[in-house]
Amino acid sequence: MIQTAAKERELFRSPVHSTIRIDELNLLERSVPKLELLDSITHARLMLRPRGEPDPHFVQVVASEFAAAASCCPIVFTKQPQTGAFYTGVMFGLQPGDTLLADAASRGGFQPLALQRDGFFISEEKIVVDLDHPRISASEGEPLFDDAHMPSPGLRRVQRALGQVQTGLDQTERFIRTLMEFKLIEPMDVTLAFRDRKRIVLEGLYTVSLDAFRDLDDSAVLQLVRAGYAQLMYVMNASLHHIGRFASLRDAQIENVRV
């Protein structure tokens, strides 16, 4: 069971850039996580802390989150370094340690499922808790269970997020496979120049090719439309304008520091 949880953990992490390239996974990787199947008796006194640190600058998302995410941040593809498999994520900043949208309030309330369920995983339809995770405490936060050993509101939110993740991963993987089949994923070429003369090159990022989509025959386009994938493609493409907004936000931060 724990092996399954570890696999799910590998599939759905919060990745970070190495310098300016998105090719390293897991923002808060610990050497050996302490994973246990969540139990209302054994873990009756466990509590859930709020996230204490700023959110990472890049977080994996699933397709059902695209509409909400597109209102505040870019949605892109990148690859798992271990396997080369594509997955989708949102950018909250341009490089590690430089998160421009550091919390849900700065994103109009959008909080990725990956962060909502942080510290918990699914193993064969059961919940696994990482007892070493910073959100898990024996002394502070919201109890996971009430006096009747029933899930608290906080744990119910985690349960909902886990269910959406489980469903969303399958849907998103089908979306990506279909786009690869029609050769609709292309690398991005983004270089940003700032007032402090710094340049940031965003490498390892991919997006949808609307040009290739328009060149498809009618039957292929109809297949993508009926599956809902055409809409997801256009949402991803429209979200990219936030990269320019992020550059402006960073320039504004530089000017504020100078003042």
Image (spheres, grey):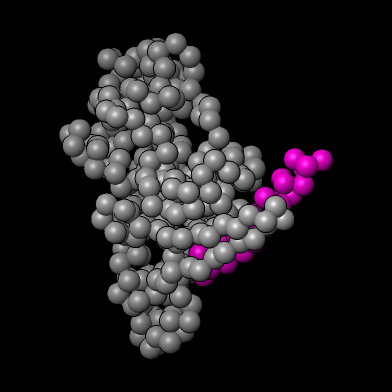
What residue lies at 20% left-to-right and 33% top-to-bottom? 2
Kindly indicate the quadrant of the structure image that contains residue 44.
top left
Examine the structure image and report whether residue 245 is included in the region drawn in magenta. yes
On the question of residue 235 being in view, the answer is no
Q: Main secondary structure of the magenta part?
A: helix
Most foreground residue, 241 or 22:
22
Going by the image, does 208 lie left or right of 43?
right
Going by the image, does 174 lie left or right of 54?
left
On the question of residue 163 being in view, the answer is yes
Percent position (x, y) of residue 155? Answer: 41, 28
Give the vertical position of 211 relative to 159 (above or below): below
Percent position (x, y) of residue 233? Answer: 47, 69
Identify the magenta region. 234-259
Examine the structure image and report whether residue 38 is included in the region drawn in magenta. no
Going by the image, does 53 lie left or right of 16?
right
What residue lies at 41% left-to-right and 17% top-to-bottom? 137
Percent position (x, y) of residue 25? Answer: 37, 45
Give the vertical position of 88 relative to 103 (above or below): below
What residue lies at 35% left-to-right and 76% top-to-bottom? 183
In the rendered view of the protein, which quadrant contains the C terminus? top right
Q: Residue furthest right?
A: 259
Percent position (x, y) of residue 216? Answer: 39, 85
In the rendered view of the protein, which quadrant contains the N terminus? top left
What residue lies at 50% left-to-right and 41% top-to-bottom? 56
Most foreground residue, 20 or 234:
20
Going by the image, does 256 lie left or right of 102?
right
Kindly indicate the quadrant of the structure image that contains residue 10.
top left
